[in-house]
Amino acid sequence: MAGGWSALERSFRDAGATTIAGVDEVGRGPLAGPVVVCALVMPFDRRAIAGVDDSKKLDAPARERLAAAIRLDALALAVAAAPVAEIARYNIYQATARAMGRALDRLANTLGHEPDEILVDGKPIKTLGRPHHAIVKGDGSCYSIACASIVAKVVRDRLMTKLHARHDAYGWASNAGYGTPAHIDGLRRAGLTAHHRVSFCATALRAP
């Protein structure tokens, strides 16, 4: 991501917005583990952190370093998760929307008010319950969203590494719960855990 703040963020600032929230999720596609959402507000009066980009384009050491810098720089930051039970009950789309809502509630509590603008990666979230601007591939083009994507990715990867220590048949420390061959082989050998998304796993196991 070149140039730090995006033209859209700068336009909101020029129009008088002082708190612009970036929101992103990590973990919609894996076979195991929660969806993790980060919502944050970065300060306009400081230079954008060098190296911030879509979390998928960064290696793990860079994400860890940048997440620490983002947490130090953020005016407000909140994380929320949708656990496996919530995903099973509501479906992945609705569970993600609910986690985004919780993250934004926590962010507003920290700020003491709702953000002036909310920028969300991807398509509009119909059930979010707040006005927001949806930006397709926003994690690669919008500074606030990219910062949120990095923090969410680091939080989720750390969680999956901890879960790997208790369930080491699936390779979660390296695949973060995604449906890699090693993970699917582990499912066939060791079966499901309480952290698996049953319907996701059934589909993956049926695949040739």
Image (cartoon, helix red, strand yellow):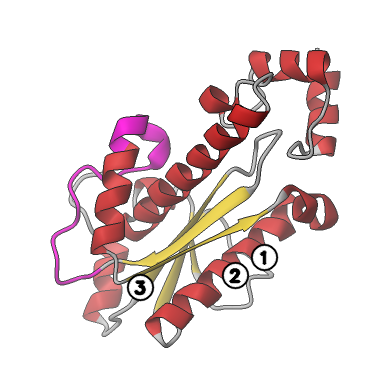
Query: Mark 1 is on which residue type?
Result: Arg
Q: Which residue is mark 1?
A: 98
Query: Tag 2: residue type?
Result: Arg
Going by the image, does 167 lie left or right of 114?
right
Query: Which mark is in front, 3 or 2?
Result: 2
Foreground of the two, 188 or 206? 188
For disc 3, the marked residue is 20
Residue 62 falls in image quadrant: top left
Q: Is residue 50 left or right of residue 123?
A: left
Residue 20 as seen in the image, left or right of residue 15: right
Q: Quadrant of residue 40?
A: bottom left
Q: Most prominent secondary structure in the magenta stretch? A: loop
Q: Which region of the structure is painted magenta?
A: 43-62
Q: Secondary structure at mark 3?
A: strand
Circle 1 — which element?
helix
Tags 2 and 1 in contact by the CB under 8 Å rule? yes
Percent across and percent down for residue 150 are: 39, 47
Residue type pointed to by label 3: Ile
176 left or right, relative to 4: right
Circles 3 and 2, Cβ within 8 Å, touching? The answer is no
**7 or 59, which is in the foreground?**
59
Q: Which residue is mark 2?
A: 102
Q: Is disc 1 surrounded by few (<14), some (14 to 19) or many (20+) residues within 10 Å?
A: many
